[in-house]
Image (cartoon, rainbow, N blue to C red):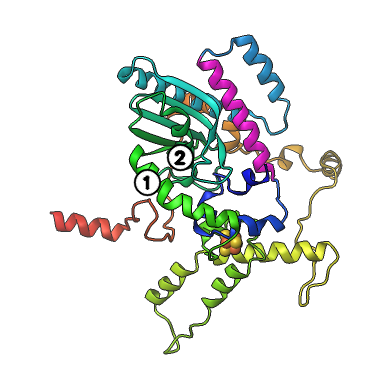
Amino acid sequence: MADHAILSASGAHRWLACTPSARFELQFPKSTSAYAEEGTLAHSVAELTTRFYLGEIDENAYEDKLAELSKSSYFNEEMLEHAESYAKFIVERLAEAKKVCADPVVILESRLDFSKYVPGGFGTGDCLIIAEPVLDVIDYKYGKGHRVEAQDNPQMQLYGLGALAEFESLYDIQTVRMTIFQPRLSGVCDSAEKSVKELKSWGTKTVKPRAKLADKGEGDFAPSEEACRFCRAKAQCKARTDKNLSLFDESPDPLTITAEEAGAILAKADDIEGWLKDLRELVSAALTAGEEVAGWKMVEGRSNRRFADEDQVVEAMKAAGYDEALLYKRKLITLTKMEKDFGKKTIAEVLKDLIVKPKGAPTLAPEKDKRPAYQFEEQVLAAFDEGA
Ligand code: SF4
């Protein structure tokens, strides 16, 4: 059983790149976060809502279960709205599938066994739609800190292989379409397709040998921003430390560096900020636990003055002769809070002409970033002049 968790689909981007990581990280504690608990609840709400939309359960069963789930402190209107948009998306995909296939099959929360490629490998697929010749694998992601892309996504591809192992003997499947539905980020869903042949070839030529190494804890450590981000060893891993320290070996000659050279350093140092944050957390945790770390101590952080009792403040100011109206400032709650309190749909309807999105300030991004390059005013004018 332990093997199942070791080579997980969600960790495949890590152990495929850094094969020793899967066994190496077992010595470090697994942390659970509020985000993970929120995500688990969001998945349950999305699954329930989809079953209702698909007619698998009736309204009473839906309401009863929803009432139970909504007791959680993580539940809110926003979570329900996202679940509804996911459920609608599944219904739409199914309707699309019906146009090309007389009897498509939809399966929620299915166990996908990809142990043919990964020792003990299995996962849970949020939604499969089988409409010959296409198999749709859909994953609901509730996180909003990190955009997950479908193209070449190992977790999705392993789910695809698991789904093929289960269903290809029953259906004529030629293509696997993998879709990430991430409602809290703009763009919401991202899809990528692979032919069955391509997917199986990846499974046999890439996954199988890498998984074999990973299962034995063998191979070379391969630190990278992507691989190390959620690794349990991230703060104490020597390979990551060595890689990041090696970036400082070069000394500039002559005595200043150019923007070109700074860009080259930044491109190599994409893991540095995350690594320093992980080191700070490690040292803070040690000091908080009473250990000594040479050169470091915990101090009291900054805090702001505040009123001990607001009602008493108002009374005191009134007694001192100040008008109560002068003590208050009327301020609208933020758009995000309004959407959370009254629902995104309501706000979109009521305020549709009153919400604007100003152009964002220019931000540095690596070349591979999917967003188009910022158009500075001079560039737009120059392009206009050239075209004139
Ligand atoms: S921290 Fe990075 S390099 Fe170290 S084991 Fe984890 S993934 Fe590999």
Label 1 to label 2: alpha-carbon separation:
33 Å
Work out which quarter of the rendered image holds the N terminus and state it: top right
The quarter of the displayed image where residue 49 is located: top right
Q: Is residue 40 magenta?
A: yes
Q: Is residue 30 above or below residue 24?
A: above
- Callout 1: CB less than 8 Å from ligand 1: no
Query: Residue 332 at x, y = what percent?
Result: 60, 36
Q: Is residue 381 above or below residue 162?
A: below
Report whether 112 appears left or right of 160. Answer: right
| Closer to the eye: label 1 or 2 | 1
Q: Answer yes or no: is residue 102 visible.
A: yes
Instruction: First in sequence, mark 1 or 2: give its number.
Output: 2
Which span of residues is magenta-colored?
Answer: 33-54
Dominant secondary structure, magenta: helix
Residue in the image at 47% along x and 50% along y: 208
Nearer to me, 367 or 29 = 29
Residue in the image at 61% along x and 32% along y: 42
Crowd rating for badge 2 (residues with CA inside 10 Å; few <14, some 14–19, many 20+): few
Residue in the image at 41% along x and 61% along y: 366
Nearer to me, 310 or 319 = 310
Query: Residue 44 at x, y = what percent?
Result: 62, 28
Numbered-mark total: 2
Query: Residue 280 at x, y = what percent?
Result: 69, 65
- SS category of the residue bearing label 1: helix
The quarter of the displayed image where residue 40 is located: top right
The residue identified by callout 2 is 186
Which amino acid type is marked by label 1?
Answer: Ser
The residue identified by callout 1 is 201
Query: Residue 81 at x, y = what percent?
Result: 55, 26
Q: Residue furthest left?
A: 388
